[in-house]
Amino acid sequence: MFRRISAIILLVKDLNKSIDFYNNVLGMEKKQESEDWVEFMKQGTVLALHPIGKKSKPDEQKKISRNAKSGNILIGFNVSDLESVCNDLNKKNVKFYKDLKNESFGKHAIIEDPEGNLISLAEMAPKEEFMQIPYYHGFAPE
């Protein structure tokens, strides 16, 4: 049976650029790194980067690249002070897909990584301040 997600693996064209973004811009700590695999997060779900490499067959590269650009992935993070996080990301010239906005569940913004993957950032309001909504409702881009 499926119990929990253990890893989110992003297929990237430029591994070094993505490593720099997740490590230096977002401040995520590397768990392990090899030539074609990098893991972030020491607890809970792992975020891994894997290059769309030259070792792949050309047909596989096209299929992977096409799927990576389809916009079907959204990684969600809860943060404690979203306004401060967004100010810091703006200073680092991170591209915002959705600027910081107050929502029924709290504060929310969406940024893009160097490969165009979307990253949802949410600061949840205390439960007594918002009505109950389905899990992750409103986190996806509109």
Image (cartoon, rainbow, N blue to C red):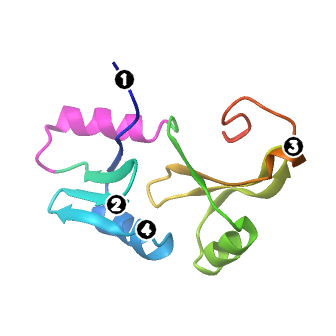
Q: Amino acid at mark 1?
A: Phe
Q: Is residue 64 magenta?
A: yes
Please tell me which of labels 4 and 1 falls first in the chain: 1
24, 5: nearer the viewer: 5
Q: CA distance from mark 1 to mark 2?
A: 21 Å
Q: Residues within 10 Å of mark 3 (few under 14, many from 20)?
A: few
Which residue: 81% across, 33% down? Answer: 132
In the image, residue 37 above or below residue 20: above
Residue 93 - label: none
Q: Secondary structure at mark 3?
A: loop
**Picture layout, residue 87 above or below residue 115:** below
* Cα–Cα span, label 4 and label 3: 30 Å
| Label number found at residue 2 | 1
* Cα–Cα gap, marks 2 and 3: 31 Å
Task: Tell me the quarter of the image containing the N terminus.
Answer: top left
Residue type at mark 2 is Lys
Q: Position of residue 55 (x, y in %)?
A: 10, 47
Would you say 18 lies left or right of 116 here?
Answer: left
Mainly helix, strand or loop, the magenta region? helix
Mark 4 = which residue? 28
Q: Nearer the viewer, mark 4 or mark 3?
A: 3
Badge 4 amino acid = Met
Q: Which mark sits nearer the N-terminus, 2 or 3?
A: 2
Element type at marker 4? loop
Res 130 label? 3
- Magenta span: 54-70
Q: Secondary structure at mark 1?
A: loop
**Residue placed most toward the observer, 36 or 131:** 131
